[in-house]
Image (cartoon, grey):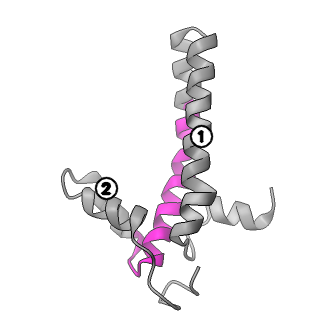
Amino acid sequence: MPAGYADFLFSAQGRVSIGEFWLKWALPVIVVTVVLEIICFALLDPSAGSIIVGIYGLALLWPSIAIYIKRAHDRGRSGWFILLFLVPIVSLWPLIELLFVPGTPGDNAYGAAA
């Protein structure tokens, strides 16, 4: 894995543009998740499939957090902004802002434009 992609997945520093988010993270994760679930639940016992999908979900936990923090940075917000995902109803605000709204133009306090 190239150092740049490792930084993309595991570092919470910097910014990730909306395009990078969708092309390098969200769409690949959606495709892999769907394929994995189809394979696991079609070929394996449901309990074994659940364990494999659970491990996959745990493996995605830190990269997901790191990438959402960088999306918040791209919007000019602190990484703490993603904690709003934990608040019912209010969680729609960061969901819409981080998944569909482009970042701030130019450089901001979190780095150069992504």
Q: What residue type is labelled 1?
A: Val
Q: Where is residue 42 in the image (x, y as percent from the top left)?
A: 59, 13
Q: Residue furthest left?
A: 89
Badge 2: residue crowd in 10 Å (few <14, some 14–19, many ≥20): some
Element at badge 1? helix
Q: What residue type is labelled 2?
A: Phe
Residue 8 lies in quadrant: bottom right
Badge 1: residue crowd in 10 Å (few <14, some 14–19, many ≥20): few
Q: Residue at x 58, y 22 (%)?
A: 38
Name the disc covering residue 31, or none.
1
Q: Residue at x 59, y 55 (%)?
A: 25
Per the image, the residue denoted by label 2 is 85
**Left or right relative to 4: residue 58:** left
Mark 1 and 2 residues: CB-CB less than 8 Å, in contact?
Answer: no
Q: Residue furthest right?
A: 2
The answer to whether residue 108 is above or below residue 97 is: below
Front position among marks 1 and 2: 1
Q: What stretch is highlighted in magenta?
A: 55-79
Q: Where is residue 58 in the image (x, y as percent from the top left)?
A: 53, 39
The answer to whether residue 16 is above or below residue 112 is: above
- Find out whether residue 64 is within the magenta segment: yes
Considering the whole magenta stretch, tell me its main secondary structure: helix
Q: Residue at x 57, y 77 (%)?
A: 14
Task: Give the quarter of the figure containing the N terminus.
Answer: bottom right
